[in-house]
Image (cartoon, rainbow, N blue to C red):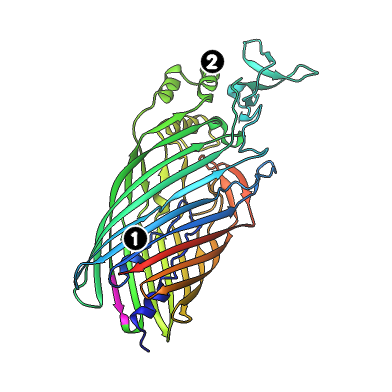
Amino acid sequence: MKLKTLTTAMILATVPMTGAFAAALDRSGQSIAAFLQPGNYFETGISVLDPDVSGKDTSGNATGDMAGDYYFPHAALKLQLNENLSFGLLYDQPFGADAEYTGKNNFVASNSDGVLPGTALTGGLPVVTGTPNGTLPNGTPVIKHPVTGAPLAIALGTPISGNTSVEVDTQNINLIFGFQPTENWNLYGGAVYQTIKGNVSLRGSAYSLYNGYDANIKETGDAGWLAGIAYQIPEIALKASLTYRSEIDHDVDVKENMPLINSMGALLVGSGAISQAQIDAIKNADGKTTITTPQSVNLDLQTGIMENTVAFANIRWVNWKDFAIQPTQFGALSKLAGQMLPALNKPNGFNLVDYSDDQWSVTTGVGRKLNDKWAGNISVGYDTGAGNPVTTLGPTEGYWNLGLGAQFSPTPQTFIAGGVKYFWLGDADAQTGAHSAAGTFNDNNAIAYGLKMGYKF
């Protein structure tokens, strides 16, 4: 079985057409398939994801669809400098998030949101954000029963409004050099420049002391690296590649706002539970926050299985288990809360976002040339997710998907390809950063569309 080079390239170009609704913050899959195309090659494209993710909070309230639509472009230029050296410039948006809660639930702020349950420190009364209508003999503001006048809750009198939301964007520029000692082998490596920025808002009773918390992550860029090896037998369309990407440390400036810290701090200081110095230390906590985007490994395989037909597979591992975000003031408050509240059992504090498992994903399928101008493929994908329970900012655990793609080549050098994937998203239990139960999300789905154009020269 011998496949012509043109036929092979035409079939394979239909494969990477859409991004994925992957575990944690993973988006693009970080493919380097364009760099391994024969000769000189250029492509550009865009993927669009339309997820539908909803569930119920621990009070049984419906969350509505909290997952936002998003798109991410990509582009690649590969130059074969001579028979032994090649160069590639690849652009993509590897990680990201876009979500917002609406309606009436524990992720949307309302009057009298619960902040803390009743404890000995509060005389057994719960603490809420509402406006007081009375006071205790010691002057503590409270909400009283409208008929009996009995105190129902301590009221902080701090109005909180808005919805829980998150938006994270990253961009990658990859500069890759390849060395081909023979026709069959390709050793490659290079530098990766990555930027990251984002915004997070926590609202509603699910977040307790953090109700009203905002974090703005200023765009920052830092560098990492990649390295890999590829083997091919063009005559039978056999190609295998293994690519490692390093983690990238971002020391970012995070502007934080915690509106409950003053009113809650005054209550705790007045009760003698903590000192004003401890509250001031949280409010004045400053310094860089380190966000480390994870290391990953991609294994790509393909082979001809009959004339004009190839089978392909991608296996991807991403080290989400070691990923965490803990902004400075958020972390300082988490340590104090973890020490004061035995039920949390977190004396060392907790993170805004973290994951319990690494992500594994597999995509496999078949591509076929139909005639001189048309080709198509079908694929099936599986993603393990990054652990369950999951963060409320991304409450799904992995997926199954089914993809279809088609490509039209008006000339031997040019093509336009499009594809669609349908995702069955995994059920998940959502939790806050303190690992407190917050809700359940079941029977969700997503659909992705992709469009790509390529030119061989």
Percent x, y for residue 405?
51, 70
**332 or 391, nearer to the observer:** 391
The CA span between labels 1 and 2 is: 61 Å
Residue at 53 percent across and 43 percent down: it is 435
Judge whether residue 22 can be spotted in this image. Answer: no
Task: Indicate the amino acid at tag 1.
Answer: Ala
Judge whether residue 195 can be spotted in this image. Answer: yes
Left or right placement of residue 302 versus residue 141 in this view: left
Q: Main secondary structure of the magenta part?
A: strand
Image quadrant where residue 219 sits: top left
Task: Indicate the amino acid at tag 2.
Answer: Gly
First reached walking from the N terminus: tag 1 or tag 2: 1
Give the numbered dot on residue 76: 1
Image quadrant where residue 43 sits: bottom left
**259 or 161, nearer to the observer:** 161
Give the numbered dot on residue 270: 2
Image position of 274 with respect to 229: above or below: above
Residue farthest right in this picture: 147
Q: Residues within 10 Å of mark 1 (few under 14, many from 20)?
A: many
Q: Which contiguous range is marked in magenta?
A: 230-234
| Magenta stretch encompasses residue 231 | yes
Percent x, y for residue 125?
65, 24
Left or right placement of residue 126 versus residue 264 in this view: right
